[in-house]
Image (cartoon, coloured by chain):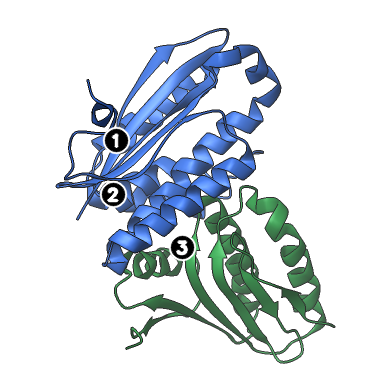
Chain colours: A blue, B green
Amino acid sequence: MGVCGYFPSDIDDEVLISYTGGVSDELLENLLYLTEKKLNQIEASLKVKKKVFNILVEVFQNIYHHQFYNEERLKNALGNNKVHLLIKRTEKGYLIIAGNLVDRSSVDAIRSRIDTVNRMNREEIKKAYREQLGSGYLSKRGGAGLGMIDIVRKAGQKIEYSFKESTNDFSFFSFKVNVSI
Amino acid sequence: MKSFYLEPTPKTPKIHFDCTNGQFELSGRSIPENSIEFYQPVLDWLDECLNSSGIAILFHVQLEYFNTSSSKCIVEIFRKLEQISKEGREVHVKWHYEEEDEDMFESGEDFKEIVHLPIELVMMKEES
């Protein structure tokens, strides 16, 4: 394999960001701005640009909360504590793939939250979103319970996800969402 | 009572609430990780302002982006205004959105549905 073989072979795809590694809050912030700059360069439609960025904000926020809420314990997960991010524009739209460790005890809650939203149609999602927004609930971590509903609502497509057992008390959570163009 | 003012940052909005003339503005980006921490001071200030003055309120919201955790705090601000509006105070909200930004338009509709306040959706034409 020549050196060129290291580059992605599908040249029609435009990669906005591809990252694997540890993160700090500052690094996450920089990754978000970098992605936004790239998005500004390649996307002409304000509507699509805002949709994608909005979803990214929620995706990054999810990662942030799982990372820093469990910061002390995650130190024990050693080399396994890597965040994966891949955002690219394909023929079908913007593909957003993210993976990170989450507390094993929150797996069921995440699963049921996504499954519930995935089963809803557009009107049901809107209704659920409004109910959740109107209820006074806000978790200690500042989570509004709205992230996943918001992502599915804005993307207009279901979330694909999976969990993989990891070390100690953590599971590796990965998910994928597409924003049509 | 002095006005409440915060400079915008890449993650937090400009907030300018003037208690003497009733002009409130929330604009820019509201995507902080911890929105409660960010909004608590303005919520506290708002209680004091609304208690100390009976002036009519005109609230301009012109957000470019906001995250879901901020949306809860925005509801809190609206709830406080809803309360004084019920008590007979004149309150008017202008929710500005860019012409192409249908998600921001829908967000305005969400808030209209959730709180009982006159929220006017104002379309901003693209600058050409």
Which subunit holds the residue at mark 2?
A
The percent position of residue B34, horizontal first and vertical second, equals 65, 48
Q: Measuring 78% from the left and 69% from the top, which residue is drawn there? A: B45
User: Marks 2/3: CA distance?
Assistant: 23 Å
Which subunit holds the residue at mark 1?
A
The answer to whether mark 2 and mark 1 are in CB contact below 8 A is yes
The percent position of residue A125, horizontal first and vertical second, equals 31, 48
The percent position of residue A130, horizontal first and vertical second, equals 41, 54
Q: Is residue A142 visible?
A: no
Q: Secondary structure at mark 2?
A: helix
Other-residue count near label 1 (Cα within 10 Å), few / some / many at <14 / 14–19 / ≥20: some
Q: Which residue is mark 2?
A: A155
Q: Quadrant of the C terminus of chain B?
A: bottom left
Q: Which residue is mark 3?
A: B114
Q: Which residue is mark 1?
A: A159
Judge depth for marks 3 and 1 and give the one in front: 1
Q: Measuring 31% from the left and 68% from the top, which residue is drawn there? A: A46
Q: Measuring 25% from the left and 31% from the top, which residue is drawn there? A: A4
- In this rendering, the answer to whether A103 lies above or below B87 is above
Instruction: Name the amino acid type tagged 1.
Output: Ile
Instruction: Name the amino acid type tagged 3.
Output: Ile
Discs 2 and 3 carry the same chain letter: no
Q: Secondary structure at mark 3?
A: helix
Other-residue count near label 2 (Cα within 10 Å), few / some / many at <14 / 14–19 / ≥20: many
Q: In the displayed structure, does residue A157 sit left or right of residue A18?
A: left
